[in-house]
Amino acid sequence: MGRILIVESSPLYTSLTKSAVKKVFSGPVDTASNFDDVKRFIAENRHDYFLALLNLSLPGAAFGEAVAYIRSLDIPAVVFTSSIEKDIVDRICSYGVIDYIIKENVANLELISRTVRRLDRNRRTNVLVVDDSATGRMQMRILLEKRLFNVSEAKNGTEALEIISQTDEFQLLITDYEMPLMNGFDLTKELRSEKNSRELAIVGMSASNDIRLAANFIRYGADDFVTKPINTEEFATRISMCMDKKDLLNELMFRATTDYLTKLWNRGYFMGTAKTLYSSAYRNQIEITIAMIDLDFFKNINDTYGHEAGDEVLRDVAAALKNRVRQSDVLARIGGEEFCLLAVNVDPRYRDAFFSDILETISSIKFNFAGEDISVSASMGVTNELGVSLDDMLKRADGALYEAKKRGRHQFIYAE
């Protein structure tokens, strides 16, 4: 996970900065108020720090000595300064820091949070730089690695496509326009036929004076475009905004498809995916089985121990079910204490054991509320008969669930 070191002589600004950092970073955060503290923390944790946030001027190090010291150890740094005079900014940049932040007012604390969150995420972001110029690739690598990205290279669009086709590890691709074999424009069009902006962000670049080039790149799928020669501050800002946009799109998709409490798929996602799988089953391409799962006497838990206890039960049951089902299965919370499982190609010889094991998985979870040890059980209705529609199949499974409840609960029943 790594650590962050905050170096600031003002107790108030130290406290505010640490709070801003902890909003977006869950790892250890150390604070130093002078150069001696800096050296002590570095001696103890040098190889753990992935980032230092520090004031340019400190007691005993008024001329940036702490910045120079930290950078001499290759610890990435962002510098706070109250001055934007050119000679000060030039001195800050000469240390090879990631960025600098102006200490103006409390509003800048949000900028600190955004910067830390972005840099922390960059450590887990893989970038593919595509350029036929070795010098151009090296320039991009230096700029990106300075901002903690993991960088790979390709010499042209054809090589980039081959690399991308073999792995899903890349989140960002930066491509030049003019290259042999396949140019950046054609590469962008080809990639966008396979991957959307949530999966892969694309930034085009070129030294061409053709003003239509940027528009065409973006029209056919690029998320942004930069002009060569690169302005490093503009480039860094555009890349950060591009990745923030990608993260936002993924967050929106997560919220739209995921149950907020259990982090399982929600009803909307389940129905959309189930319709696709049902169509495949109807064409005899796969076999599907639907199981409706309902926790027994769940209302008693809420009434006796409170809704927080009920939420804990739902979260733990969901986690256990998610670990038990297969990757090919679709598991969702569809309401209250009810879950739905669509299982693909369950071997008929092991179907009973599969569903019995799911019930056993649920009943084996132990809880302690108000000093009492309790467990929960579940009932299940199952069908693998396609019927006339997906809705019909779901109704049949729901009817079997009702029958399982009627027969005493903690069992599964196949729809007749």
Image: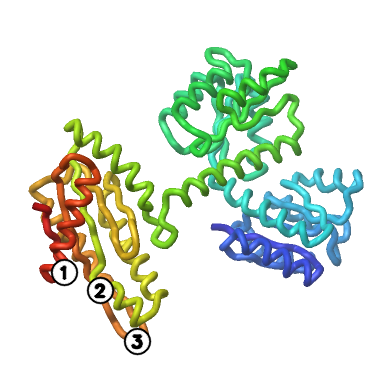
Looking at the rendering, which quadrant does residue 304 occupy?
bottom left
Q: Are there few (<14), some (14-19), or many (20+) residues within 10 Å of tag 2?
A: few
**Circles 2 and 1: CB distance less than 8 Å?**
yes
The N terminus - image quarter: bottom right
Q: Looking at this rendering, what residue extends furthest in the top direction? A: 181
Q: Answer yes or no: is residue 68 visible.
A: no
> Callout 1: few (<14), some (14-19), or many (20+) C-alpha neighbours within 10 Å?
many
Q: Residue at point 8% right, 48% down?
A: 349
How far separated are the C-alphas under marks 3 and 1?
26 Å
> In terms of secondary structure, where does tag 2 sit?
loop
Q: In the picture provided, is 253 more to the left or to the right than 318?
A: right
The amino acid sitting under disc 1 is: Arg
Q: How far is mark 2 from mark 1, CA to CA?
A: 9 Å
Q: Amino acid at mark 3?
A: Gly
Q: Report the residue marked by disc 3.
A: 371
Q: Which residue is mark 2?
A: 297
Q: Which of disc 1 and disc 2 is earlier in sequence?
A: 2
The coloring applied to the image is rainbow
Q: Secondary structure at mark 3?
A: loop
Tell me the CA gap for discs 2 and 3.
20 Å
Image-based side of 284 in relation to 146, left or right: left
**Residue 409 disc label:** 1
